[in-house]
Image: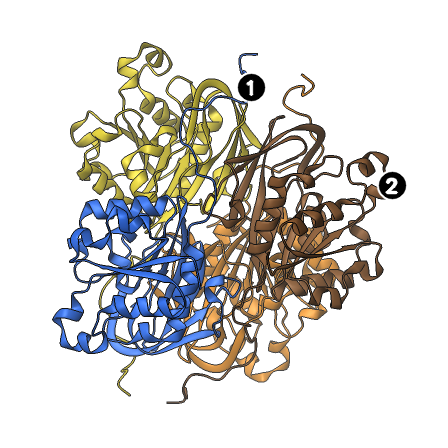
Chain colours: A orange, B brown, C yellow, D blue
């Protein structure tokens, strides 16, 4: 059991429009991710693009400690008002886990300040996510690498700020590497980018991937640190002496 | 002599509207900063908010290696199209030096992804900028600290991503500290935030401050690194075997 | 209650030899620190320089998740074999919290690779430890700063590698700043340097300081990440093709 | 022409004892590396293990801005007094470039504070060093990756502190990745670890590798930053008020 409350957001278009995807994720990618959290004792809800306010109302976010984000083809349809809301929540402490093609999502690009571009190839090739920081709690319970037999390739250069901790670095059969597990602090919140998870591969059913997502939720969950004030302040003592 | 071409941008409103400021910077803050660069052999131009396109046309930016940015009361008047242009240039390699109240400028907030808030006090108090990274070229030629006898205070928490290198940390007489010299890489470009420089103190006439700005321009100037491609790529070898 | 087992190490010389120190810490600094952990539900033991093997036998370390280290005048008397043992344990995952004058201890210098020098002044002056990373769990439960009315001053430059996360930055009345809460990963272990704690000031009785030490123990405790192997390895597939 | 003075240090045993190595580097690895620097206008000297004081006398180091280090089988024969001397020089500002199997050299392990272990395989397999920080001057003049057709493999986990800037990440044909270009600041000095360079592959004759070494020498060369003092200091003002 965890007391971290997770909201799983998904674009949920591929699964409804593409038969090949629907076979892999018949109930949507969000349900597969949510199932992983539920198995591990997390209070979980889901939200999708076509819900009112994309399912991310103030009320939903009030009950969200960590938000996971999967999107791909419809990033532009995410309303800027909702993006503002999500970004503000992160800066105030909510955790954000950005998955795979979510690298191009509006909230991630806003929080990174860069283009978040990369190379790619849809080739069903082998990927190995090597743990490059064994001291990091997101790597808890893992072996030295996670091997995914068929993956979409993402390759460097990944145009993000240098990760503050780099938990995973991927090797791809076809010749590329990728910084696949990237930790950031933004304001009072924490952001984790995790690479695996294409819509045509059953990656979110894997136990190791679900363990990473659970570890990442624990790591990204809001702490109890100070709420900084940003204002005109008095000096400690009279400076006129 | 340096072959780095610097463009000094200034909001240039305080100096024209406020007598006290005009006494300190009769030709505008930009001219004082530009003078420092010219003394040190830099090819320098200036641009201000009320110039057409804020003086930051594509043609001007084509001849700019490093842009310095001072703004305060009119951040919102900076046109988003110009902000986009500046941010794109930085991601493509142009250096950006953000000065003092420029922490709230649109380009800086966009590149940081955070609110960039802080505490402040206009009290003419003493500041010491301690060099916390003596190996960094931006500290070249300095003593262990730069002491500014009268400064506006900026205090933590400074809501920016953790600097990738922290060159200066400020002490203020009234009880605060501040990360005053913050280095970032963004895309192929480099950003340096430098705290000193209020409009009512003659800080940009100081030799040590001008040396820091010159060092920072050298550090932030575009390199000759690879221009990454972001596209669908072929594998090194046929993956079908 | 926590399941993190803490061993509190202390040089324990000042308290036995100096009346002024004995008044502040009659049972030794280690007992004051240990009391803070016990109050917070930690299984705690203590060890001191003059114990056999300095109290840090393999058996003791086998039951230690996090070791705290306070030393000052007798760093050189710590046996190199014990130092090796402690350093190896850290690289294998044990947490290490280095306190105040422990900056010059052998294990800390070995793990940092630098001289760990700093400026100092014994003046009983005011210190404010500003939280510079409110997203960090070591800052949980704190206000924006911890104010210590009488402290020994430590000033920059602090000759350590740039902290991987900088949780606290201190302000001192007399004109200095200091990076006072510094996080590092080393091998599979984690190291936290925390500045406060001179032998003549009752700093380790403070609730806020004890809370920081408890937070730091949680952060530094060994995780369950992979144990890397370092060896000659076979390729994924035959490379002779 | 550069005004950076480079000293190239080599163990110089393989080349004299192993015919296969002697064919690749008949005058020793140091001469091949030195040739690359000389071609690019650097004042260069060499030093080897079997020279008196390993060729690294105080006089030689007085004329050294950047020291490159290649060693493999005889790390233990490097005298601790010379190691101390080198480490002290680095902390005082001298640049250090550690090459390939130098990861296990005494100076590197001392400056890192970790075991510096890794996986390996002598298989003559293909390596691609991807530039993961295109803004970094060490990547100047390079393409997106450097491809080495036959290399010894080094694989993660590489047991070093997280690099402060990560310039290269290697892909290996057999399934591993490696952080191959790692930047560190230590004291007033800078350290760069660069992976390529096995004794049986002609890697140090390559123009791209020589360009990297030249860029790295420029980056690591001593600056003109402040020389910190570490002592008992007076307060800015009388604290007794």
For this view, does D170 lie left or right of residue B76? left
Image quadrant where one finds the N terminus of chain C: top left
The answer to whether residue D238 is above or below residue A47 is above
Viewer-proximal residue, A203 or B128?
A: B128
In terms of image quadrants, where is residue D36? bottom left
Residue closest to the far right: B17
- Looking at the rendered structure, the secondary structure element under dot 2 is helix
Residue tagged 1: D237
Residue shown at 40%/54% (left/top)?
A: D162
- Looking at the rendered structure, the secondary structure element under dot 1 is loop
Disc 1 packing (10 Å; few <14; some 14–19; many ≥20): few
- Same-chain check, marks 1 and 2: no
The answer to whether residue B119 is above or below residue B77 is above
> Would residue A224 be seen by someone viewing this image from the given angle?
no
Viewer-proximal residue, C169 or B124?
A: B124
- List x then y, in percent, for residue B57: 77, 65
Residue tagged 2: B17
For this view, does B240 lie left or right of residue D137? left
- List x then y, in percent, for residue D53: 18, 51
The answer to whether residue D148 is above or below residue D222 is below
For this view, does D40 lie left or right of residue B195? left
- List x then y, in percent, for residue D54: 19, 54
The answer to whether residue D209 is above or below residue B105 is below
Disc 2 packing (10 Å; few <14; some 14–19; many ≥20): few
Residue shown at 38%/37% (left/top)?
A: C2
- List x then y, in percent, for residue C207: 47, 25
Q: How many marks?
A: 2
């Amino acid at each position: 059991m965890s007391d971290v409350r997770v909201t799983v957001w998904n674009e949920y278009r591929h699964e409804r429009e593409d038969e090949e995807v629907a076979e892999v994720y018949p109930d949507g990618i969000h349900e597969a991710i949510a199932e992983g959290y539920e198995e591990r004792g997390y209070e979980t809800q889901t939200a999708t693009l076509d819900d009112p306010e994309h399912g991310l109302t103030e009320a939903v976010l009030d009950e969200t400690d960590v938000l996971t984000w999967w999107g791909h083809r419809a990033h532009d349809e995410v309303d800027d008002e909702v993006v503002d809301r999500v970004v503000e929540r992160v800066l105030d402490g909510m955790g954000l886990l950005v998955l795979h093609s979510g690298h191009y999502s509006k909230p991630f690009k806003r929080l990174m300040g860069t283009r978040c571009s990369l190379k790619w190839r849809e080739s069903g090739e082998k990927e190995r996510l090597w743990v490059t920081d064994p001291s990091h709690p997101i790597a808890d319970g893992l072996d030295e690498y996670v091997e995914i037999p068929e993956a979409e390739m993402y390759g460097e250069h990944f145009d993000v700020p240098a990760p503050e901790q780099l938990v995973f670095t991927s090797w791809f059969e076809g010749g590329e590497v990728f910084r696949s597990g990237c930790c950031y602090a933004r304001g009072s919140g924490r952001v984790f980018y995790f690479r695996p998870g294409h819509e045509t591969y059953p990656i979110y059913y894997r136990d190791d991937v679900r363990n990473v997502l659970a570890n990442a939720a624990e790591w990204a969950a809001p702490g109890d640190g100070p709420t900084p004030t940003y204002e005109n302040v008095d000096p400690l003592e009279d400076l006129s002496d």
